[in-house]
Structure formats: structure tokens, C-alpha cells
Image (cartoon, rainbow, N blue to C red):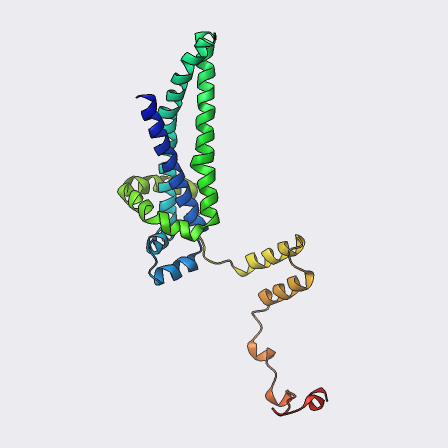
Amino acid sequence: MSFPMALFVTVLLLIGSGFFVAAEFALVAAKRHRMEKAAAEGRRGAGAALAGMRELSLMLAGAQLGITVCTLGLGSVSKPAISHQLDPLLRGLGLPSALSYGVAFAVAMIVVVFLHMVVGEMAPKSWAIAHPERSAMLLSPLFRALVKAVRPLIRLLNSVSNGLVRLCRVTPRDELAPVHDREQLTHLVAESERLGLISAADSQLLTRSLTEPGTPVGALCVPAERITSVEGGAGIDELLR
């Protein structure tokens, strides 16, 4: 393969890796209720994003498969192409053949790893996390189409991984839990107070509201005959009295 063609394939593989990374993080970071609202409003891509969130395990397996294929492509196409271009230049500078090949290989690996991490993973991840709902609606239609094309393979891989998870006595889940339970929220309040994010008074109030739902509402009501009231046209003196 010629060097210009290898560069072109490298760009495509980086774009592909970035696409799968962004789609993966978008589906994880997007809020379910916002997607449901967008789907109800008929916004483009919201239905596909919501469907992807409902089978999140399968979609994440598809993203990992896509990222792996792109990574292998960069290793088999981009790294040798860069190495073969550098090797003659280094020999021209007087390096022995054995040394020049090793240096060219190391430089090519550093360049490819850097491009893959920054362009193919970190930048798309940051973009998807910054705009999760918008990126989910934008990427999900194509992402779901690609996953659908290789669904049997992904289901097989996902079944094997779920089997390994069950061996660790953990039940696999296809989607994220949409809500937190009372214990998790109480712990979150305590941690927020410890870190100084909320005051002790606010922490007490929130904790009591989370731990007191067992009290019957009737016990908290004030009977009408015990309520002190004034006429609607009462003046300031009457109100103060």
C-alpha cells in the first residue's frame, strides 16, 4: 500500500474510532428522561438514542468491537507505513540498518498511539460528555445501523462476557438503573456535607426527608380547628396581634 493511501486509511480509522467512542459515551451519559422528552417531541435521532439506551449492553459491545477493529487497523496499516517511511531517512543519516529499523518502529508506534488516544478516543469522549443528549441523537441512527449489521456476532460476544460476569456472581444488566434508591441518596447527602458542598443544616433537612417517609401523612397534618386564622381584609395590626 502506498504511503498516501495509508495516510488516507489512517484518517478513516481515526474517524471510525472517534465515532464509536463518542457514541459509547453519549449513550452512557445521556439522561433517559431528556431522551424520552425529545422522542415524544419527534426530534430526529431521539428514538434511535432511546432504543440504544434500552439495550445498552449490546450497544456498548458493538462500540468496543468497532474500537478494537479500528485499533487493529491502525496497528497493521498506519504503523508499518510510518515505519517504512522513516527507516530510509534514518539510514541516510548514518544509522545502522538494525538500529534505524528499531528507531523507526518506536517512533511510528509513538505517533500512532498518540493519534489514537488523542484524536480517536480522548477528544471524542470529551465532546460526547459535554453534549451527551445532542451527540446521542446525532450518532445513534448510524451507530444502531452498524450494530444491527453485526448483531449476531455482538450477541455471541456479549453472551460470553455475561457468562464470565455471572461466574463472579454478578447479574449482568442491559441498561443503567434510571434512579437511585433511598440509601444511595442518603449516602450522597452525607458525602456532600463532608466535602463542604452543602451546609450541615441542609444535610440534616435532606437526610430527615429521606429517612422519614414511613411516617403517616395524617400524623403531620394540623387539624383545622387548631389553625389560627384571620379575615381576608385584616390589617397589619390584626395580623401582628
Above or below 2: residue 239:
below
Instruction: Give how far across and how far down residue 96 sits, in percent.
Output: 46, 7
Regarding residue 173, the answer to whether it shows in the image is no
Q: Is residue 156 left or right of residue 110?
A: left
Residue at x 59% of width, y 79% of height: 219
Q: Is residue 14 left or right of residue 231?
A: left
Regarding residue 189, the answer to whether it shows in the image is yes
219 or 169, nearer to the observer? 219
Above or below 18: residue 44:
below
When asked about the image quadrant of residue 101, the answer is top left
Q: Quadrant of the C terminus?
A: bottom right
Instruction: Give how far across and how far down residue 59 sits, in percent.
Output: 36, 45
55 or 125, nearer to the observer? 125
Q: Is residue 60 left or right of residue 93?
A: left
When asked about the image quadrant of residue 229, the answer is bottom right
Instruction: Give how far across and how far down residue 33 sits, in percent.
Output: 43, 60
Residue at x 58% of width, y 65% of height: 210
Residue at x 28% of width, y 40% of height: 150
Q: Quadrant of the N terminus?
A: top left
Q: Is residue 190 left or right of residue 103?
A: right
13 or 57, nearer to the observer? 13
Instruction: Give how far across and how far down residue 239 sits, in percent.
Output: 69, 88
